[in-house]
Amino acid sequence: MALPANFLDELRARLPIATVIGKSVKLSRSGRERKGCCPFHGEKTPSFYVYDDHFHCFGCGEHGDVISFVMKSTGASFMEAVEDLAGQAGLEVPKQSPQAAQAEARRSSLSEVLEAACKEYQLWLWGQEGRAALAYLRERGLSDDTIRRFQLGFSGEGRGQLATALRGQNIKPDQLIEAGLMKQGERGPTDMYFGRVMFPIRDRRGALISFGGRIMGDGQPKYVNGPETALFSKRRSLYGLNLAREAVRKGAVLIVVEGYMDVIALAQAGFGGAVAPLGTALTEEHLEEIWRLSPAPVLCFDGDAAGQRAALKTAELALTQLTPDKTLKLLRLPAKDDPDSLIKRAGRAGFEAELGKAQPLSAVLFDMLKAGQDMATPEGRTRFRQRLLGAANTIPDKFLAEEYRNALKEAFFAATRRAPAPRFQPGGFAKGGRFAPPPPPVKIPPRSAPDAEAANARRARLMLAILLAHRPCCRNSRSRSRISPCRRRMSPSGRRCTPMCSPAKPLTPNRFSPISGSSALLRVPPNWRRWPRRN
């Protein structure tokens, strides 16, 4: 409902924002402001500043006034935050219009009817007629404490049984029909659920809004959800939301799964931040509700083909709402596994190991879009590339969209890069040749230091022997490299060296160079004196 602006101004004036935030965040004074570690992202160095009328985090960018702080920190709606703060300030929230008050009274009445039905369902589950349903839940691995915590029940087998049971509480069949517990049949009102295990569905505040029923055998439909009512909308409601909200506030990871039993099995194993849609794919309203609790929830999908299709559909929907502050992680379980079966098979440690494999949406989007694409032809690759760019272009934030485009382009070119062509290896007449990939390069081990020094010495002796044997090569050598042909070693620095060859024994055609060594002997050419000089 719309609230007067002067009421909101008075509410903000009566409750200093530093007082409200200081109840959950440790603040210290920094000049005229206060600062502390941001409650919206993990940090060790304070970057969260509280001013007179607003707060701002220089680490993650969160900002707002006292009302938005309560909404973001607790996941409350605007009216819930206002009512909470008004209670702290001692203010009375302005009354609603007559039409709004009437609608609120109607919703309150329906909630009371649902609560009465929930108690009956629980009594029947723990009574004589619910023995089969209770045994079924225990066989599914649920403890009695878990069954009571989630207030599971049994719908009974008789037609009109619920109306008969609630007649003593002055609840009429018309109210049961309006609440979605009965429907109008050809012979009068009849129960919506027969012989089913009942799952109460609550909103984020814990108010009961509908039920879901599961058959215990192999019949169809396996699940039956309540119809749309003044309280309940499948597009907006999530199973386990009220319990997950409290768990996430205490540090639990928000995990979105596919079914009721997955939520309960995860909660029993210690993963209290699990929620599930109600017989439908995730919608925009679901994503908004999820992001109110956590900026980076984990979407966990079954390992079958249907689960993979649901993951792709959700990813494409989420792209249209992504912002730098709202993202997703995706967890794809092994084939033929769901969270319930995985916990039964591998326990808490097994699911925790899989949870650690959850990847950001940007890391798995390429593989999800690639499934079923034709990558063997230029036309197929072109269509796939267009699909990648089209998916990135649906992101509303232009900078984030550019980042996704770059990441998808890099993945595309890496996937389409050609491998080296195979070599043809000829064989015998009977075997014939064959194509095989090129052999790996042969790694030559590095030579040790003594071997390297010996090789360098041999090269030096060989070069000097060539220079001494071929006088034209030694022309102007004294001025260039300071070489004395028969007196001293080559010295690039020009320093004096020890004599290397004897001047008393000049080279002749029948004599070897005295410095050549046994491994690099060089014979002086017979006609070396007759070589023409080069100018």
Image (cartoon, rainbow, N blue to C red):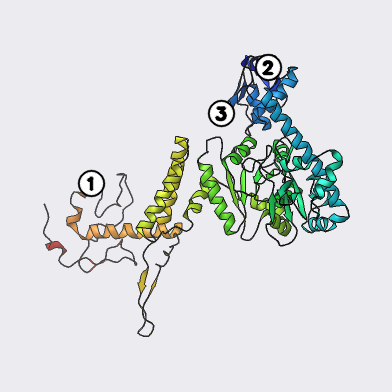
In the rendered structure, are the residues bearing label 2 and label 1 in contact, judged by CB atoms less than 8 Å apart? no
Check disc 3 and report its element: helix, strand or loop.
loop
Left or right of 261: which side holds 404? left
Residue 535 position, x and y percent, is 11, 51
Q: Please, what is the three-letter code of the amino acid marked with disc 2?
A: Leu
Does residue 25 show up?
no
Looking at this view, is 450 or 44 the one in front? 44
Looking at this view, is 116 or 139 the one in front? 116
Residue 422 sits in which quadrant?
A: bottom left
Looking at this view, is 515 or 200 the one in front? 200
Residue 291 position, x and y percent, is 61, 37
In the picture of the structure, the residue carrying the numbered disc 3 is 61
> How far apart in space, not on screen, are marks 2 and 1 (Cα)?
93 Å
Q: Please, what is the three-letter code of the amino acid marked with disc 1?
A: Arg
Looking at this view, is 509 or 143 the one in front? 143
Estimate how packed mark 2 is, as few (under 14), some (14 to 19) or many (20 or more) residues with alpha carbons within 10 Å.
Answer: many
Q: Please, what is the three-letter code of the amino acid marked with disc 3?
A: Gly
Which circle's residue, 1 or 3, is located before the other in the chain? 3
In the picture of the structure, the residue carrying the numbered disc 2 is 11
Which circle's residue, 2 or 1, is located before the other in the chain? 2
> How far apart in space, not on screen, are marks 1 and 3 (Cα)?
69 Å
Does residue 138 show up?
yes
Mark number, residue 480: 1
Q: Is residue 331 above or below residue 230?
A: below
Estimate how packed mark 3 is, as few (under 14), some (14 to 19) or many (20 or more) residues with alpha carbons within 10 Å.
Answer: few
Residue placed furthest toward the bottom: 430
Check disc 1 and report its element: helix, strand or loop.
helix
Mark number, residue 374: none
Label 1 or label 3, whichever lies nearer to me, is 3
In the rendered structure, are the residues bearing label 1 and label 3 in contact, judged by CB atoms less than 8 Å apart? no
Which circle's residue, 2 or 3, is located before the other in the chain? 2
